[in-house]
Image (tube, rainbow, N blue to C red):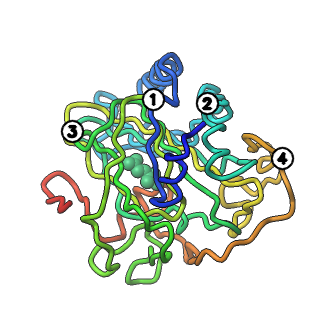
Amino acid sequence: MLTQQQIEQYREDGTVVVPGVLDAATCKLMKDVLAELVEGSRTVTAHDNVYDLEPGHSAANPLVRRIKKPHTVHPVFYDFAKSNALTDCLRDLIGDSGRLYGSKLNLKVPGVGSPVEWHQDWAFYPHTNDDVLAVGVMLDDTTVENGAMYVIPGTHKGQTYDHHGADGYFTGAMDPETCGVDFSKAVACEGAAGSCSFHHVRTIHGSAQNLSNRPRGLLLYEVAAGDAFPIMGLHNGYGGSYDEYKSRMLYGNETITPRWSDAPVRLPLPPAKNGGSIYENQTAGKRFFGFKDTTISL
Ligand SMILES: O=C(O)CCC(=O)C(=O)O
């Protein structure tokens, strides 16, 4: 359960970091599973259903950028999504029922870990209402140095920004030069391993490359209120399967009566030319965080 102050901070800022949500034993198990997965990537040469690879990945030097849908890869990742430790927090933020829209485990390998450019998750998966959020479970002590995610407080109450390139195709990234957002207001979601960040689906966020010598694992769960339905339909997140959609209830009761809110929507269409993951989508957009020698102006 969250404190009243944490709930109010989420409502006001569209983000809150809560320490100690993931217990140390489960965190260790997740990291052990992750180490095995990274080991297993040595035989993988291209992005597939499980692995999103950093440029330069090889059998000798495995560089994994993301484990896709970890809740389908090992039960520990799904079990924690359904645990009281997490669902008690979710209940306080999005109400009496919650459904897992998606999951991903973003790694930022020391000295490599790719940046994620500024975006709103809402641009990827608008729903009938915006009681939708992402949980970031910190598997490592997370600071600015090893690539903590930045959020821009209050932006969940504002507009839905254009995430399209000059050619009109979705890029999954805002144009940092023209969007008019004051990025100096960004706040880093730092915390000890086991902390969770919660950010509203409309909150602008992104993260820099990890140029430190410490890894940064961030397990992300995207969770929608049980009565929020994906506007793009069940192909968006559930492989077109109603059974899959139903099976993803984390807590509370399902309904076939969506609730609507007046949150502004822009559809992620036409789809990104570079598909597969946000990292690939964003290669078509302009860079704010950039790679290695790019100046970060926060
Ligand atoms: O890994 C991060 O720091 C940010 C992740 C994110 O925003 C995303 O994957 O959509």
Between marks 3 and 4 in the image, the one whose residue lies nearer the viewer: 4
The residue that appears at 54% across and 41% down in the rendered structure is 3
Which label's residue is closer to the chain start, 2 or 3?
Answer: 2
Label 2 – label 1 distance at C-alpha: 11 Å
Q: Is residue 246 above or below residue 267?
A: above
Mark 3 residue type: Gly
Q: Secondary structure at mark 3?
A: loop
The residue that appears at 47% across and 64% down in the rendered structure is 120
Q: Are marks 4 and 1 in contact (CB under 8 Å)?
A: no
Mark 2 residue type: Ala
Mark 4 residue type: Asn
Label 2 – label 3 distance at C-alpha: 33 Å
Label 4 – label 2 distance at C-alpha: 19 Å
Residue 85 badge: 2
Q: How many C-alpha atoms fall within 10 Å of the one at disc 4: few (<14), some, or many (≥20)?
A: few
Q: How many C-alpha atoms fall within 10 Å of the one at disc 3: few (<14), some, or many (≥20)?
A: some
